[in-house]
Amino acid sequence: MEFVLRCNDLKCRKRLHERAVVTTCSHVFCSDCADTTGLSRSTNAHRTCPACNASLHNPDDVVVAGLSPSEDYKTSVLSGLSPTIIMECASRALAFHSYQTSQEIIYQEHLAKGLTDKYDTLSQQMDQLIHDANAQIKALQDKMQAMQAEQEALETKNFELAKAYKEKTIAHQRVQNHYQALKGQVNLTHVARAAGNEAAHTLQNARGDRFIDRLPGTRTGTANYSQMNMSHQVGGGRMHNRDFSRSSENSGRLQQSSIHIGAPLNPSLQRRVLGGRNNIGRELTPLELHRKTPGVWLP
């Protein structure tokens, strides 16, 4: 591979093809860098090499060389010179190329070393990033597994709570139904007790009365007594007098159900009458009352 000269300015590093500015300190620059650094000034001015800061006082210390000379130039450039001078010029030219080659190698090695160091640094950073990423992934996986286990535990607990809630709901419904049944029984008992108390109060008030007002579906006690007296008169006077005297004591003792009571109601009879009413929660018909209390005459 043919060696290609480059501008020795580290900020430029441009390839040199046609023309170049060469110094006696074995450095070469492009025309733009020579103009910028002052190498292209007049020969009498003070010049300094931009690469090594060497002073270039002599006019021939800085020359403009053609990198692609013509055949005529190659023929005439060294013509007339002794072989010693020609060999010396050639050796100095070869030393220049050897120096440029070694500097390029050093530069490339330095550049390679810098790139290698940078690559090593980036590689270490990448390894650290990969390690941190793997650690974070591992931590997240562990956390996810823990959360999955917690989710399963919560689902199991939720299922158990739902089952317990369902059982409690069924038990509560049973208790509610039982409560409603007991409440109905208590209400019926209270109603029956109130009806019994009202009947007892009515009977207590009716004891001091001789007759009771006629209710729908019954006859007054006067008509009953009149029929009884007529039947006793047909049988005999003595029987009539006894029945009449008895009627004078017991007439008017009637129940609220408009039935005629022949004899005074004792407490046991009252309990029998009220018991029938309390048990069924309604008024007894005259036939039912007659069956329960033989001492009661039906109208």
Image (spheres, rainbow, N blue to C red):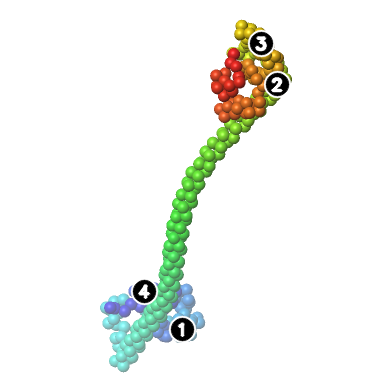
Give the residue type at disc 1. Cys
Which residue carries the number 4 mark? 15
Task: Name which of mark 1 and mark 2 comes first in the sequence.
Answer: 1
Which residue carries the number 1 mark? 52
Mark 4 Cα within 10 Å, few/some/many (few <14, many 20+)? some
Alpha carbons under labels 1 and 2: distance apart: 151 Å
Considering the numbered disc 4 on the image, is that residue within a helix, a strand or a loop?
Answer: loop
Specify whether residue 60 is in view.
Answer: no
Q: Residue at x 39, y 73 (%)?
A: 14
Alpha carbons under labels 1 and 3: distance apart: 176 Å
Q: Residue at x 44, y 60 (%)?
A: 149
Tag of residue 207 = 2
Considering the numbered disc 2 on the image, is that residue within a helix, a strand or a loop?
Answer: helix
Query: In x, y percent, where is residue 135?
Result: 44, 69
Please count the marks in the image.
4
Alpha carbons under labels 4 and 1: distance apart: 20 Å
**Relative to 41, is 231 above or below?**
above
Mark toward the viewer: 4 or 3:
3
